[in-house]
Amino acid sequence: MLVFGFWTTKICNTRNCFNKIVLIALFSLTFHCNGFASIVCPDLKKILTKFDSPSRWFMLGKKCKVPAGARERLKEAIAISEAMSEHAQKQAARYDLLLPEDAGFLEGDEDEDTNTISQADIADAVDITSGSKYFNLHLSQFGPYRLDYSRTGRNLLVGGKKGHVACIDWQTKDLKCEMNVMETVNDVKWLHTEAMFAVAQKRWLYIYDSKGVELHCVKKFNDVLRMQFLPYHFLLATASATGFLQYLDVSIGKEVAAICTKMGRLDVMAQNPHNAVIHLGHPNGTVSLWSPNQKESLVKMLCHRGAVRSLVGKDKIGDTALYMVTSGLDRKLKVYDIRAFKPLHSCFLPAGASCLSLSQRGLLSAATGEIVQVYQNVLGSNPVSKPYMAHRLRGQIWGLAYCPFEDVLGIGHGEGFTSMIVPGAGEPNFDALDTNPYRSHKQRQEWEVKALLEKVQPELIGLDPGQLSKVDQASFEQRHKEQVEALGFDPLAKDKFKPKTKKKGRSSAGAIEKRKRKVAHEDQRDEIRQSVQERTEREKELKEKSNEKKLGNKSTLDRFRK
Amino acid sequence: MKVKVLCRNPDDYVRETTRDIQRVPRNYDPTLHPFEVPREYTRALNATKLERVFAKPFVASLDGHRDGISCITKHAKSLSTIISGACDGEVKVWNLPRQECLRTVQAHEGFVRGICSRFCGTSFFTVGDDKTIKQWNWEAPGYGVREEPINTILGKAVFTGIDHHQREGTFVTCGQTVDIWDEQRSSPIRSFSWGVDSFSCVRYNPVETELLASCASDRSVVLYDTRESAPLRKVIMQLRSNTLCWNPMEAYYFTCANEDYNLYTYDIRHLDVPVTVHMDHVSAVLDVDYSPTGREFVSASFDKTIRIFPKDKGHSREVYHTKRMQHVICVRWSADNKYVLSGSDEMNIRLWKANASEKLGLLSAREKAATHYNKKLIEKFQHHPQVRRIARHRHLPGDILKQKRELREMREARRRKEQNVRKHSKPGSVPLLTEKEKHVVAVVE
């Protein structure tokens, strides 16, 4: 087994050799959400606009509808819970002012394009620590490299196609482990902590310790080409060359689901971090969405005219939409809104992007051949044609990944690994209770236990992760029907209005009739509404039947159908 | 060009010395915290399961009585003292924290029918089968001094219950009639009767201190005002009520424990329909007592269980039973809202936790926060079927389970029959009665 000794990193000066492109205005990275602020309170609006902070995320104005025939208690309960939720949102919004860090940015001079600025220039212009984030690892012997950053962004895992697997703490350049597995390595992935990682080798799936000790060889998972780790479910989803999508629960070590997709070789895979749905791209241009609970795909979308080369999914900060970016052999890069399954916009790339990656703040990086281009504001409604940054390498690009919480893009290519500085890519403020890059050993232990206790069961994976919080109208109606049958009367039905008999001569027959008439129009309206509804339903049914007759498959047995 | 690359100073994120606590910077951005609802749901499920795991309500058993316990009373001022009377006339004073009997008094010959403690906390009254009312000192007499009541009153008939006023020196007893006594007199200052031969229980309203209610043997509950000369009104039910208890927080609600296995909460302003019917017991309900918060009450039943009901719900939230506990005659909720005391037929008083999974003792701030969070999670997801299934699950002894099923079948059969009768008779001739309306026979002014 070949063992590498000690290698040094070299910071190469790359030369930029891009053509000058027409300058277009760069959008600022901060944006306001004015609608939110005015709902919450006017002072907050002032504070937020003053500090220019992105009021990003508040799921607001989602007042739930109080049903018409609701009782007092229900109305009170809804009002109380809404008030508490608003208060909580306000408090969380106010915390935004206390966030310590600001996002990075890159602005060119008046006649300068940001994509002409080279990495070396950026590394010289910033301080030493940030400058050292641009480095190259020359590993030209063992094939193009795939890479993966751990969830906290401290550790980097590189896997070369010819078998070289290494894990490094890339900031201190501390080598954790390095080995050659003597087999083709298709993909590498960290599991939930830096203690274990999975390597999809030529035949089976192997799981190694951070010291390089082989822990498991999972023979059930054969011919794995791509892997994705769902962190909150502790599931490792693997796509194989035989067309199987398999899920492995890494906390208990059981295979949760093995789905035969029947769509051929599964080469292109992405996960949607918002709802843990797996996106697969196929050679016929379709993208299919999968969850471990169904044997069929949840959704199938036709995205490209040629094969889909790569895709990536994301939820946007400050918005409730979900986005998917795909690129295909037809040299198009398309952005889709996944909630409505609608294409937003597409742009033309001179060569189709083989790898795509989205950073935490919405910067898209596309790799074509030996060039990496980073685009800004792709997820908005206005398409941007000019890249924000670009970088040229030596060697075919095989893997792209943004480092979480850092302004760094890692590129795995035929000549090794390059770490590129992309200002504004990383989320500046992390939440220490979720992922803390500076956690100590004890903190990591506590976090791991809590995360395992909160592990979401795979049965809850679906297109809408918040489905559990919605009112189950269907079963309520079912139960209500059964109750009415059992009791013989409808306990929720409104009683007919009976006017109170008043004293002192106010309850003569004429006065009672007048009082009844005041309320009568409401009952009448209800009746009319019901009858109109019934009529429209009947008309719809008739229409459908007539449509069927017109278009429908006429068979000789039709005359026997009732 | 202007460039800024994200660069963090580790000194801002790592603690300075090992004696410091760790730094935990927060960011409440929802994109950093996906899967809110499923993770909360998982936490709620875990919280429900843990609550069942830690549900160990039995604290202690006080034994020493030589006959079944007929009544228990709390000390008016002290949380650690209670007094219990047995069916052989013995009255014992207990210290709860040390679970020992401080003093035993042979108070009556025959049953001790009722005990009540005076509001100042210096003395208590007992009534018994020997037609006497005796007033005793709370403090034990000195060494060598015989146990003597401060005062003894002889009555004409057996007294079956006693209760003391909250602020003044008057008390009320019930037996053949409801009598209001002044402590200094030896004959009642007023007597109420309404053509009934016996009353089983009388209670002063703790808030509106001039109101009284009593349970009579003609299946009625009678309301009195001490300022009036005659009883106010009464509500007659299908079966007799054994005891009643006023809600200490709401002046107009009282709950009576009935022989038809239910408890009824009435509003004194509208006695024609009970506010709530609490159904869960499988045998006659013998005693009821409210929690000092007024939000829940505990009931003791002949079916060897005690149940805790929320004041507005129709079903119990908790049931306590033991193999050793036989018919539970009396039950009290302690004044600090934490414990429930039950006195039963087999001469034992048992101390239970009111919240079965509560951790006793002093909790740290983090423990308290975690308990509150778990409680809120369970409340938020209480309607989800998995959470509800676990939270509702209580083990019941075999005969009670069988009896419950039998009662359910009986009720179903009755309902079906009524529906059939209604279907096959003239519309409107068989009126639709809700569950609440079924149990009240009449309200008499």
Image: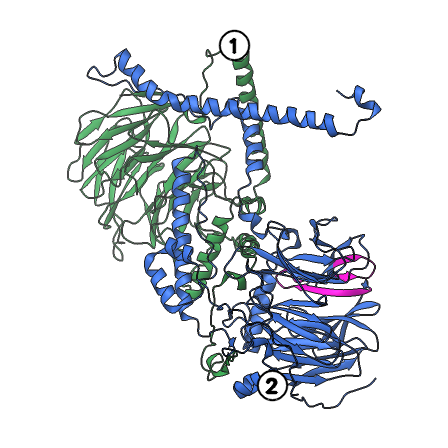
Chain colours: A blue, B green
Secondary structure of residue under mark 2: helix
Q: Which residues are magenta?
A: A223-246
Question: Does the stretch in magenta take in A243?
Answer: yes
Question: Does the stretch in magenta take in A213?
Answer: no
Identify the residue at horizontal 70%, vertical 84% (top origin).
A137
Looking at the picture, how far across and down is residue A276, in whole percent? 64, 57
Secondary structure of residue under mark 1: loop
Image quadrant occupied by the C terminus of chain A: top right
Callout 2 amino acid: Ala
Camera-side residue of B354 and A350: A350
Residue A120 is tagged as 2
Do discs 1 and 2 share a chain?
no
Q: Chain of mark 1?
A: B
Residue B425 is tagged as 1
**Residue B218 visible to the viewer:** no
Quarter holding residue A550: top right
Q: Is residue B415 left or right of residue A330?
A: left
Looking at the picture, how far across and down is residue A272, in whole percent? 63, 59
Camera-side residue of A246 and A61: A61
